[in-house]
């Protein structure tokens, strides 16, 4: 496929994009932007985006991206949990400030990723007609870990998001979700920017102590 053919397919798919995908894309981009800014609005905007994404992946994709659909339901519940955590204060200070994982938090995150990957892959292989087993399960399991770390404002969440987005870009392109493909490219750029911005914030806060 030539670059011109890729562009033509991309353009035609964007023109045919349903309103659910447009709305989900805008809300999810806003959510990642607020996450980058360490703003609690990451969660209400994200909730709208992920619920619509779950609908798209299950009811519009053919065959459905089952793992991604379920993953977005997980995002919904973790967004509620993260929203609660980010609002908590202790002596006017954030209860969960930006920080790197300690050794146990890092190990637990890696274990969560590996278990999620195996479980999701097995479920896709045994219970669905998915034809993207490896990529779908990789995107989902890395995002599960990313979301968990983000609820605690852990720096590693951005690294996991970067990995997840790199996998999600070709997966969504293959499925014909061109707007979501573009969204994940922007997510990747925002994740890199978020990692750098949080590192700066963490360094600044450390100097104040």
Image: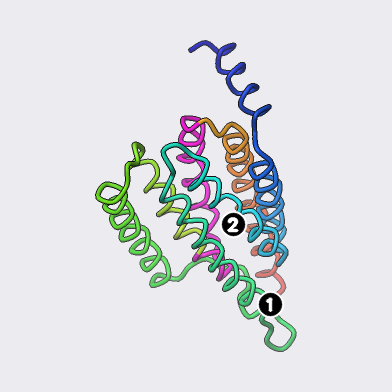
Question: Please, is residue 84 above or below residue 76 in the view?
Answer: below
Name the residue carrying label 2: 51
Residue occupying image coordinates x 55% and y 46%: 56
Question: Please, is residue 32 above or below residue 90 in the view?
Answer: above
Q: CA distance from mark 2 to mark 1?
A: 22 Å
Residue 117 falls in image quadrant: bottom left
- Asked whether 12 or 197 is in front, the reply is 12
* Percent coordinates x, y for residue 50 in the rendering: 59, 55
N-terminal of the pair, mark 2 or mark 1, is 2
Residue occupying image coordinates x 61% and y 16%: 8
* Percent coordinates x, y for residue 123 in the rendering: 29, 54
| Mark 2 Cα shell of 10 Å, populated few (<14), some (14-19), many (≥20) | some
Residue occupying image coordinates x 65% and y 45%: 20
SS at circle 1 = helix
Residue lying at the far front of the rendered structure = 59
* Residue bounds of the magenta highlight: 148-175
SS at circle 2 = helix
Residue 168 forms part of the magenta stretch: yes
Question: Please, is residue 108 above or below residue 158 in the view?
Answer: below
Camera-side mark, 2 or 1 = 2
Magenta segment main secondary structure: helix
Residue 38 falls in image quadrant: bottom right
Question: Please, is residue 199 above or below residue 19 in the view?
Answer: below
Name the residue carrying label 1: 87
* Percent coordinates x, y for residue 81 in the rendering: 57, 73
Q: Are marks 2 and 1 in contact (CB under 8 Å)?
A: no
Q: Which mark is residue 95?
A: none
Residue 150 falls in image quadrant: bottom right
* Percent coordinates x, y for residue 144 in the rendering: 45, 59
């Amino acid at each position: 496929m030539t670059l011109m053919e890729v562009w033509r397919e991309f353009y035609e798919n964007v023109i045919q994009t349903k309103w659910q995908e447009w709305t989900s894309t805008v809300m999810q981009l806003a959510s990642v932007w607020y996450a980058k800014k360490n703003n609690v609005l990451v969660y209400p905007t994200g909730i709208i985006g992920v619920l619509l994404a779950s609908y798209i992946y299950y009811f519009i994709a053919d065959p459905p991206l089952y793992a991604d659909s379920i993953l977005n339901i997980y995002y919904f519940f973790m967004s509620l949990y993260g929203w609660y955590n980010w609002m908590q204060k202790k002596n006017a200070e954030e209860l969960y400030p930006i920080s790197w994982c300690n050794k146990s938090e890092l190990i637990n995150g890696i274990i969560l990723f590996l278990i999620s990957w195996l479980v999701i892959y097995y479920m896709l292989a045994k219970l669905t007609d998915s034809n993207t087993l490896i990529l779908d399960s990789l995107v989902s399991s890395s995002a599960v870990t990313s979301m968990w770390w983000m609820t605690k404002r852990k720096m590693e969440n951005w690294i996991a998001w970067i990995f997840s987005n790199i996998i999600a870009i070709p997966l969504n392109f293959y499925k014909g979700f061109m707007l979501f493909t573009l969204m994940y490219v922007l997510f990747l750029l925002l994740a890199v920017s978020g990692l750098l911005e949080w590192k700066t914030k963490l360094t600044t806060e450390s100097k104040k102590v």
